[in-house]
Image (cartoon, rainbow, N blue to C red):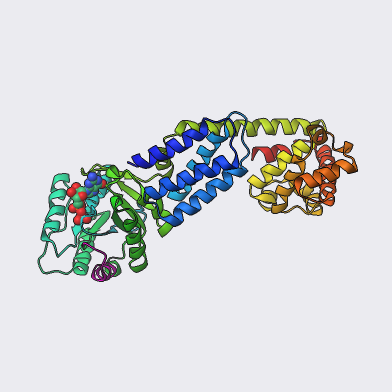
Amino acid sequence: MFDNLSERLGGILDRLTGRGSLSEADVDAAMREVRRALLEADVALEVVRSFTDRVREQAIGATVVKSVTPGQMVVKIVHDELVKTLGDDGQTIDLNAVPPVPIMMVGLQGSGKTTTTAKLARRMVQRDKRKVLMASLDVYRPAAMEQLAVLGRDLDIPTLPIVAGQMPPQIARRAIEAAKLGGYDVVLLDTAGRTTLDEDMMKEAAEIKAVANPHEVLLVADSLTGQDAVNLARSFDQRVGLTGIALTRIDGDGRGGAALSMRAVTGKPIKLLGTGEKTDALEDFYPSRIAGRILGMGDIVSLVEKAAANIDAEKAARAAEKMRKGQFDLNDMREQLLQMSQMGGISGLMGMMPGISKMKNQIAAAGIDDRILKRQVAIIDSMTREERKHPDLLKASRKKRIAAGSGQSVEHVNKLLKMHRNMADVMKAMGSGKRGPLAGIAQA
Ligand code: GDP
């Protein structure tokens, strides 16, 4: 599953991780290749665009932690963005309703609807210990009704007896009545599919939905059909309303485009994956696991996570120590500014830190808002190491050079220095007491 995409992305990112440092041009070149790989995997163009844009922006702005290479950071960013694109973890079938809980399966003929119905029933019976009734509503294909009955016999799961001449909404009503009488927990309604998306199918599905009032409406879609599956989901959702998607034939899907586009395009979660023909070949959908499979770089991802956690703890300890000693230079300030912007900017921070409200006035006086954080960092970056440690030494001529170097005015440089002095004073005052806000900032 996802073999081609895995190989392509793996190759591109491997080349990045081998290098010492990364330039913007390196990131751009890699993103062009990632874009091509995703398009070849049949991922929707809009999804590809926003994905590569987001990765690029973060990769270029990322602060690289000591023990990992910039390329490894990029792998982690790609991984996290894949997870975001695939959706949130834990979106599984919801059975939280008064039993019998009706679940309606919709989709095209041949998508794996009947098989998935049987797989889901089997799992609910065997794993979740529920009492499940299955009903086929495919009055157009007696063979399909028979297929479900055969699967039910094999699995020892009851199916609703077939009554000739009934229409699908009637059968749905009968199934729910039978489930109530029989004390069932769940009733699965396997509706009829057509070979293509047509109005009759939609109309019928809407009618059945109105009668059955299902707790879940799952679209069963064949992942091998790529973007067609995504378009199908969008139409079904608009016309009938879906609660989730079961993506089948993942076992044969080397490309993965449908899985990657589905959530972003339709807004509906993939809840189940069909991974084979047998009735036990069903999996829950965990975006983090899938992203891991696609990238196959779990080692690097956890390495960067650990390194980032260590670095934060180290920084916190160092910052606290400096504060106690009343030392707070521009390097420390730079660190704080970067962390602030990573943590959702000033407004996000204010809500989180109890101690920092004392600094609110200084920050407001210095005119910091979230955009300005980046400018402040640029000014500090234009200083020499010595100057950052001892900003008092800065003369007018150097301030001019620093302003020019960072594309700012001397006034901005002066504002920054004033802000630093104010912050250092507040730090010192707080540092002499108990643990100040800085340790909190660095740890959060
Ligand atoms: P329906 O017409 O939508 O009800 O489709 P079926 O359930 O009859 O499935 C059509 C074919 O696809 C059958 O041969 C199934 O065994 C096969 N199938 C269904 N799901 C999967 C899957 O996840 N993987 C594979 N490899 N085959 C599947």
Camera-side residue of 24 and 205: 24
Q: Magenta span has 174?
A: no
Q: Residue, x 24% and y 42% (percent of image)?
A: 280
State the residue at coordinates (78%, 33%): 385
Vertical relation: 20 (above or below) 82? above
**The C terminus lies in quadrant:** top right
Please determine whether, in this image, residue 201 is positioned above or below residue 146: below
Residue 402 sits in which quadrant?
top right
Q: Judge left or right: residue 319 versus residue 286.
A: right
> In the picture, residue 235 is in which quadrant?
bottom left
Residue 211 versus residue 220 in the image, above or below: below
In the displayed orientation, state which residue is furthest to the left.
Answer: 164
Residue 81 falls left or right of residue 194: right
Relative depth, front residue between 409 and 181: 409
Q: Is residue 32 left or right of residue 443?
A: left
Relative to 39, residue 63 above or below: above
Main SS, magenta region, reads: helix
Quarter residue 306 falls in: top right
**Residue projecting furthest to the top:** 67
Q: Is any atom of residue 422 visible in this view?
A: no
Q: Is residue 391 visible?
A: yes
Quadrant showing the N terminus? top left
Going by the image, does 438 lie left or right of 343?
A: right
Magenta segment, which residues? 195-208
Instruction: Count all numbered tags in the image, as a single digit.
Output: 0
Q: Residue at x 60, y 43 (%)?
A: 60
Q: Position of residue 322 (x, y in %)?
A: 78, 31
Which residue is pictured at 76% across the width and 46% down the height?
406
Where is residue 222? Give x, y as percent: 28, 52
Could you tell me residue 329's position as x and y percent? 80, 36
Estimate the x, y position of residue 312 in percent, counting from the top left: 64, 34
